[in-house]
Amino acid sequence: MARKIKTEQEKKKSRRRIIIILVVIILLGVGGYFGYKYLFKDNAPKKIVEVKELDNLSEYGYTLTDKDSKYFKSEYEVLKKLLTSGNVDEKEYATQVAKMFTIDLYTLSTKINKYDVGGLEYYYNDKKDMFEKKAMDTLYSSLLDDTYGDREQILPEVTNIEVVTTEDTTYSLGDNEVKGYLVKLKITYDSDMGYDKEASLVVCKEEGIRWSVVDFQPTLEPEYE
């Protein structure tokens, strides 16, 4: 039986078929990839960000978590060393409380949402709810949710606190005048986004050994009645 010899025209048709088949395979592959990515992967259940406790000073009500900033963690170690030294300098303790509160309050980059107000562990218990609500309505009001770790919002992170002064003071708590310290601070961020750069805090003794912030004003010239 004689072998059929392909003409040049038939060869061209054959090459066209092969090219078309390859193009179809490529298109199906690309379509399959993006179909998986957008139809399946993006619709898969998202994993909630878990916050892990790294350390605590339970006697005082302070905790350290893995979501806290590097600077906050370093200052927490300063506080821990101070409180476990056996002979606590109360003025130094009050000053450190003011620093920790301010770092945590203004480092919005580590917060899950607007309800995750920083610094509450260092605030006076009887005044905490009022301060928390004010922070949510002002400083934290535009904070986007990061429950699933996919937030792209650019947020401030405190990188340094300079203690300007720590002075003896008195403060009215209900019907009582209590002794405390007025701590004035300057705040530095990783980038200037227009957030407060000054703060004045009154820190008073609470529950025997614990010192807590009872008043906070974002200025070095606070006003009191």
Image (cartoon, helix red, strand yellow):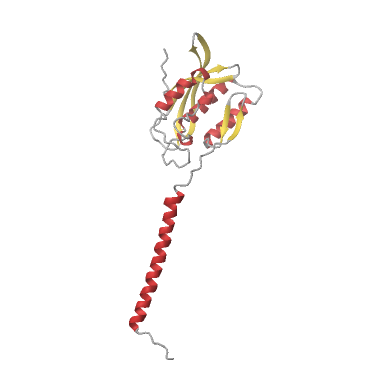
Of residue 96 and residue 73, the one placed in the foreground of this image is 73
Q: Measuring 35% from the left and 77% from the top, which residue is drawn there?
A: 13
Q: Measuring 53% from the left and 37% from the top, which residue is drawn there?
A: 67
Q: Measuring 48% from the left and 27% from the top, which residue is drawn there?
A: 102
Q: Is residue 84 left or right of residue 28?
A: right
Residue 224 position in % (x across, y down):
42, 14
Q: Is residue 56 above or below residue 87?
A: below
Q: Residue furthest bottom?
A: 1
**Quadrant where the N terminus is found in the figure:** bottom left
Q: Residue furthest top?
A: 175
Q: Measuring 51% from the left and 42% from the top, which residue is drawn there?
A: 47
**Quadrant where the C terminus is found in the figure:** top left
Q: Is residue 89 left or right of residue 155?
A: right
Residue 209 position in % (x across, y down):
60, 19
Q: Residue furthest right?
A: 86
Q: Residue furthest front?
A: 1
Of residue 179 and residue 117, the one placed in the foreground of this image is 117
Residue 205 position in % (x across, y down):
56, 17
Residue 72 position in % (x across, y down):
53, 33
Of residue 219 and residue 63, the one placed in the foreground of this image is 63
Q: Quadrant of residue 84?
A: top right
Q: Is residue 46 above or below residue 139?
A: below
